[in-house]
Image (cartoon, rainbow, N blue to C red):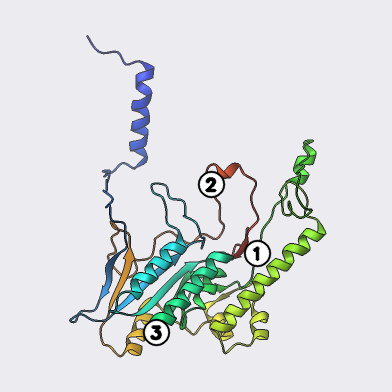
């Protein structure tokens, strides 16, 4: 007798069929990769020009929003960009065969403190190793991304790079108008009149705005100081004239003195070879185990940099958005 399929049994089968169909009509392969117990960074060669034990150039990527917390990951814990950056610098510094460093930046910036830590760590790398450091800008190296680049000996921008956005933003929202329309009034018991400043549940008072503006101005002054240290040919007055928050093309940045030259990753490698006085080099990158890097371009994560940060994490999603100070180019934020 034929077996009768009940609706309850049919639903899981239909769900599985729909899932398989979503992958397309062609053959589908599923990869299960074991994760090694040893999660320390491993060196991979992304460009080998041959020769017997040629000197190395380490390639370190800074990709996406710069933050001092782990980036969300669908199938993993995610990496803390600041921690990973420092770990990569330490590995490069500990290898005597590494004679130079390229920091490839594809970032619109991010948190004030995260940007400042990475800038300080890159300066520390230069001071303790004496090795040349070149910052290579890709699609976007704006705000905190440019802040970091100022710690390098030389800044190279791709012909189509967007950079600049020197400044600070503190984005806040207020739901007070909406709450009043539905008859909801927020109230808080605080230990001081400024304790709830910046709350999205009430309008921003003039004295609160003045307080935050003073803080933004101080962070802006620090940004200007960082640029002045990294670009000694520019006067502070000139930097402030350039630092009104706008972004620049590579050519505009070159004419303004914000970068040293326009080039590519390969031209940056060629220039470092000339500086080192060598004919061949081996370019290496540092990654977690299981990563495959077939060439010098694959070392950079494939996802484009985020311009507007939309954080959809649980349970923080249900908390009121907290104000934060950012070195970030985010036109729609």
Does 17 appear above or below 109?
above
Residue carrying label 3: 130
Residue extending farthest right: 206
Residue 261 in view of the camera: yes
Residue carrying label 2: 312
Give the CA distance from mark 2 to mark 3.
42 Å
Indicate the quadrant where residue 22 lies.
top left
For label 3, the crowd category at 10 Å Cα-Cα, with few meaning under 14, some 14 to 19 and many 20 or more, is: few
Indicate the quadrant where residue 164 lies.
bottom right
Q: Residue at x 29, y 68 (%)?
A: 295
Residue carrying label 1: 169
Task: Measuring from the top left, give residue 146's x and y in whole percent.
Answer: 53, 73
> Does dot 3 land on a helix, a strand or a loop?
loop
Dot 1 or dot 3: first in sequence order is: 3
Give the CA distance from mark 1 to mark 3.
34 Å
Does 109 appear above or below 48?
above
Q: Quadrant of the C terminus?
A: bottom right
Task: Measuring from the top left, give residue 169's x and y in whole percent.
Answer: 65, 64
Q: Nearer the viewer, residue 99 or 158?
A: 99
For label 2, the crowd category at 10 Å Cα-Cα, with few meaning under 14, some 14 to 19 and many 20 or more, is: few
Depth check, mark 2 against mark 3: the one in front is 3
1 and 2 marks in contact (CB < 8 Å)? no
Q: Residue at x 46, y 83 (%)?
A: 154
């Amino acid at each position: 007798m034929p077996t009768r399929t009940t609706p309850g049994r049919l639903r899981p089968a239909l769900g599985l069929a729909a899932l398989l169909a979503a992958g397309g009509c062609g053959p589908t392969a599923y990869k299960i990769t074991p994760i090694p117990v040893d999660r320390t960074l491993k060196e991979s060669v992304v460009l080998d020009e041959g020769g017997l034990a040629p000197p190395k150039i380490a390639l370190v990527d800074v990709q996406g929003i710069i933050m001092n917390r782990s980036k969300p990951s669908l199938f993993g814990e995610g990496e803390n960009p600041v921690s990973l950056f420092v770990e990569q610098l330490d590995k490069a510094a500990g290898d005597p065969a590494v004679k130079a460093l390229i920091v490839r930046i594809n970032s619109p910036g991010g948190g004030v403190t995260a940007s400042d830590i990475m800038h300080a760590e890159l300066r520390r790398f230069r001071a303790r190793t004496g090795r040349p450091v070149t910052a290579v800008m890709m699609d976007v190296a704006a705000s905190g991304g440019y802040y970091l680049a100022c710690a390098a000996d030389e800044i190279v921008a791709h012909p189509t790079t967007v950079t600049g956005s020197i400044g600070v933003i503190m984005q806040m929202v207020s739901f007070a108008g909406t709450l009043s329309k539905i008859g909801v009034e927020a109230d808080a018991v605080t230990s001081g009149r400024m304790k709830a400043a910046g709350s999205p549940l009430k309008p921003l008072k003039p004295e609160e705005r003045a307080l935050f503006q003073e803080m933004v101005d101080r962070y802006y002054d620090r940004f200007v100081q960082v640029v002045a240290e990294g670009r000694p040919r520019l006067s502070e007055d000139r930097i402030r004239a350039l630092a009104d928050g706008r972004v620049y093309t590579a050519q505009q940045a070159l004419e303004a003195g914000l970068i040293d030259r326009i080039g590519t990753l390969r031209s940056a490698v060629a220039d470092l070879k000339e500086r080192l006085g060598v004919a061949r080099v081996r370019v290496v990158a540092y990654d977690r185990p299981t990563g495959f890097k077939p060439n010098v371009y694959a070392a950079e994560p494939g996802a484009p940099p985020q311009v507007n940060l939309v954080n959809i994490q649980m349970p923080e999603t249900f908390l009121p958005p907290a104000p934060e100070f950012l070195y970030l180019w985010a036109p729609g934020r």
